[in-house]
Amino acid sequence: MTVATHAAERAVLRRPLPKIIQGGMGIGVSSWQLAREVSQAGQLGVVSGTALDVTVARRLQDGDDGGHVRRALVHFPAPEVAERVLERFFRPGGRPAGTPYRPVTKLSLRPNQALVELAVVAAFVEVWLAKEGHDGLVGVNLLEKVQMATPFALYGAMLADVDVVLMGAGIPTDIPRLLDVLARHDAAELDVHVDGATHRHSVSFDPASLGTDVQRALRRPMFLAIVSAHVLAAYLAREDGTRPDGFVVEGPTAGGHNAPPRGRLTVDETGQPVFGPRDDADLGKVAAVGLPFWVAGGYGTPEGLATARRAGAEGVQVGTLFALTEQSGLTAEVRGELLSQMDDGTLTVRTDAAASPTGFPFKVAVLPGTAADPDVYAARPRLCDLGYLRVPFEKDDGSISYRCPAEPVEDYVRKGGKVEDTVGRKCLCNALTADIGLGQTRRDGYDEVPLVTLGADLDGARRLLERHREGWTPTDAVRFLLGS
């Protein structure tokens, strides 16, 4: 069986492959509203699948403005599960001012049933809303680093008939097989990396526990692995069990997490990692793998799309142009500051080698009042109450515990972590929820502050701002990229 035939049998989209993939950004920045409009414009709209359990739970606690979450919940195929989520989190009229959000149980290798139900329901809600009322393509983007949430998020998205799954920030070798299993509603198991492990560890999920109809197989979505090197593309494609249906090839100027520079890490005079020619994937070798691919990072212009197509790509993945639209999840204040600084030429995007607890470089927009400001970062009490980037580790007695380099330093060291790994680490989980207006309010009066990520190449965004002084829509961005 050839690679092309294998891909065709694995997942068949209901329309031609898109030229544009809208990036799956942040926690809730790639909102269902954004993905829906991009999809309706004929391209692939993508919702962020990261931490959907907390975002949906917090929207419900804020009163579910517009009734969108509740409208989607009516269609969840296990009504009693949807009702339990609604009963636990919905507050008519929203939270009283100054009231903290009700906590969501942290991910673990053995999650309780309430967390499983919320995670599945939340992914269903976001994808269902993005697909509501049209037949365009909708995808969901997940982080490989957040492994303990993956089976539940995938199943929820598949219950909503998601068309494409995208995954980066790691090597997603197990996802093709996992999608096959979940499409049959079979019990699934996903291997999870555990520091210091002496044996295999995994997270398990049995769809039958939800009471959904398991007689009808789900449509298996197309899977795109996000990679940074042609070597990784070839490695994933060589076996049926790991072969995706295509790739997004992401360069070091892309927003969010970047792959570390190849070889020995060096930094420039500003402390940013130095990327070189070795960090650019050979697109000719990616094309030779025989699977469709898109390129990302520095391709957010009509000329970038044309260059990608000449290299054999189906098209491009673009984030920044869409993050700056009103339909993205960014708050009006954050978006306004970004556009203002871009307009006056002062907007700076840094590659911060230390910010992310994952250890991956992370793009950070340098905005006042955010965690990118050293004084603001220093004033935040270190804590870890969301825990999506916690890493499980095996203790001496064989039991499992969890740690994060952004948690209190003494806690991390007590758990066997190295103190040097905590330097400069920022709590992305809490900061990214603040980006979209869902940051936690704490009883001591401290409100979480944002930390904003964008791509380093702002050429396309600046050109759009020149054309649309009052801001642009996702449809405007699509038309710009297509040269129309």
Image (cartoon, rainbow, N blue to C red):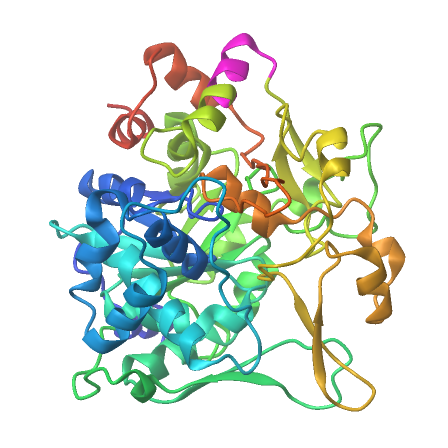
Work out whether residue 223 or residue 369 is closer to the camera in this orientation and state it.
Answer: 369
Residue drawn at x 54%, y 83% is 110
In depth, the one of 164 and 277 nearer the eye is 164
Q: Is residue 215 magenta?
A: no
Q: Identify the image quadrant of the N terminus.
A: bottom left
Along the line of sight, the residue nearer the viewer: 243 or 459: 459
Q: Please give the name of the residue rendered at 16% of the width and 83% of the height, measured from the top-left corner.
A: 216
Task: Name above or below for residue 461 compared with residue 101.
Answer: above
Q: Nearer the viewer, residue 115 or 272?
A: 115
Q: Give how far across and how far down residue 81 sits, in percent.
A: 27, 75
Residue plotted at (23% across, 65% down): 160
Image quadrant occupied by the C terminus: top left
Residue range in magenta is: 338-346
Please tell me how many numbered marks the rendered image carries: 0
Percent x, y of residue 2: 36, 74
The reply to whether residue 49 is visible in this rendering is no
Whether 295 is drawn above or below 374: the answer is below
Q: Position of residue 49 (x, y in %)?
A: 41, 57
**In the rendered view, does 179 fall on the left or right side of 339?**
left
Choose top left, top right, bottom left or bottom right for residue 12.
Answer: bottom left
Q: Give the quarter of the image for residue 74.
A: bottom left
Instruction: Say left or right for 343 vs 79.
Output: right
Where residue 22 appears, as percent x and y from the top left, is: 36, 42
> What predominant SS class does the magenta segment belong to?
helix
Residue 112 relative to residue 230: left or right: left
Residue 326 visible within the image: yes
**Residue found at x 11% / y 50%:** 133
